[in-house]
Image (cartoon, grey):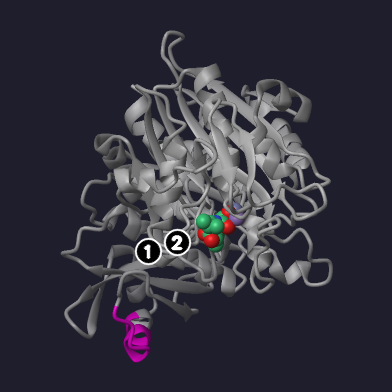
Amino acid sequence: MKISFDSAAPRAEVLVVFAHSDGKEAFSLTNPAKLIDTAGKGALAATAKAENFTAKTGQVLSVPAAAGPGVRTVLLVGLGAATDKLSAADIEKIGTAVFAALNARKVASAAVVGLDDIKTADLDAAAVADHLALAMRLSAYRFNKYFTKSAKDKQIAVKGVTLVTKAAGAAKKLFAESEKIAAGVYLTRDLVSEAPNVLYPASFAAIIKKELAPLGVTVKILDVPAMKKLGMHSLLGVGQGSVRPPRLVTMEWRGGKKSQKPVALVGKGVTFDTGGISLKPGAGMEDMKWDMAGAGAVVGAMRALAGRKAKANVVGVVALAENMPSGSASRPSDVVTSMSGQTIENLNTDAEGRLILCDALTYTQRFFKPTHIVDLATLTGAVLIALGEDYAGLFSNDDGFAAVLRDAGAAVGEPMWQLPLNDNWDKAIDSTIADMKNISGSRYAGSSIGAHFLKRFIEPGVTWAHLDIAGMAWTGKDRPTVPKGATAYGVRLLDRYIRDTVEG
Ligand code: BES
Ligand code: MN
Ligand code: ZN
């Protein structure tokens, strides 16, 4: 699907126009819609009325043959009340609705007119067009590679959309950047959707190199001997039950000042989580192919940042392992020494995310000396109990930093909610045989316990936040800008955080 911007409407199969809601049952056409209505002798308004169209935000009505020559169909789209100032999220919701309506009708070409009439709180005309375009691009994602029979009808039908605005030049510039963010989102969705027999640590690492190295990202892949040398026995312990050995991958983007210390993004990449010897129940286990969504988000964010040549120094580090039960798997009660030197009693092999992340965190701090670390992990089922599929769990050793991330997430529709840390929960992971254990032994405050485990690996002076994204990685239903399936939660918020806070 090609998305372009123009100051005049080209010929297209469908013309998309807008209307405001006006009181309870009525609507008012914006100027371009009025022109069409007049040309068609009132057919557009009459049809809309007959169809009980009320121009609620994102409401779409298809009106055949109401338009002038060369245009077959008009799509009338609701903007809500004329007095409402639309937010970026509203525009994106509308963009998703427009794309869905076009695609469902198998429309090949469309022109969207009247964008400049949209009233917003703080967006100029170019930004409105950019958000609409980005929403359409993000909504057009499909993971279709394995369909051999129904491939054709699963393809996106829309071939080209032109957004008509007086700010076409500026919109085009903005959208060039948005396309890079979308490319990051697409990459993450591809990775998270991929089957675990195809995406495993070594193949994941190879994809990272192939995707990011050409963009100027320095990619390093640590294999098992390299990790042994570094003493990453916690990470290695998680991977030792699988015939597919673990990897640690680092991605360096140096777009900022030489003297500037980097920000680090660290991701959990369990390519499949059976639970190991602490085996998960069979029902729903297939969901655990997306237990690498944290790593997926880090890779997608790096792709976005490098793609748009962000003026920031950012390192991505992902810990990749497959958690399998086997004769070589780790046992509940195993004790390992992590790269940090701290010892860990592994009392539940299903609490494996923290075991791979701790070594990734130590490696990150030792070799990259970041000022800030954000880790992303599908770490606990408990975060779903607390926050459902509406918020990621946010933990931080710095409330100011937590607020920065929360604002970035809110701005791009990737919400999070801060949950507490507490010294009692830190004590709860003291072990009787080692420095710590990987579970508390209680079912309470499970997500905070996980965060506390990670916190023990954060060195003094480092600002750190942990995002538990177990509820956010995948969606069973279509949402604005997010078709059902892998969400790529984290990519847009990390890009936004870097853009707003790290870049000058
Ligand atoms: N990958 C899971 C967490 C998860 C659960 C992600 C559901 C997405 C949906 C993680 O490795 C895990 O198994 N966590 C355990 C921790 C427990 C053993 C302390 C859990 O949440 O049950
Ligand atoms: Mn697990
Ligand atoms: Zn897991």
Was residue 80 drawn as part of the magenta stretch in this picture?
no
User: Residue 497 at x, y = what percent?
Assistant: 37, 36
Q: Quadrant of residue 119?
A: bottom left
User: Residue 402 at x, y = what percent?
Assistant: 30, 40
Residue placed at 30% from the left, 43% from the top? 423
- Find disc 1 in the rendering and name its residue: 386
Check disc 2 and give the amino acid type: Ala
Q: Secondary structure at mark 1?
A: helix
Q: Secondary structure at mark 2?
A: helix
In this view, the residue in front, 81 or 232, is: 232
Residue placed at 37% from the left, 64% from the top? 386
- State whether residue 201 appears in this view: yes
Side of 344 where 86 appears, left or right: left
- Mark 2 neighbour class, 10 Å CA radius: few under 14, some 14 to 19, many 20 or more: many
- Ligand 2's quadrant is bottom right
Q: Is residue 11 above or below residue 107?
A: above
Residues at marks 1 and 2 touching, judged by CB atoms closer than 8 Å: yes
Q: Main secondary structure of the magenta part?
A: helix
- Mark 1 neighbour class, 10 Å CA radius: few under 14, some 14 to 19, many 20 or more: some
In this view, the residue in front, 45 or 130, is: 130
User: Residue 492 at x, y = what percent?
Assistant: 45, 44
- Number of numbered discs present? 2
Extreme residue toward the front, this view = 432
Residue placed at 37% from the left, 89% from the top? 51
Q: What is the magenta range?
A: 45-54
- State whether residue 421 appears in this view: no
Question: Is the CB of the residue bearing disc 2 within 8 angstroms of ligand 1?
Answer: yes
Q: Is residue 270 above or below residue 255?
A: below
Q: Is residue 308 above or below residue 146?
A: above
User: Residue 284 at x, y = what percent?
Assistant: 64, 71
Q: Which mark is residue 382?
A: 2
Side of 334 where 400 appears, left or right: left
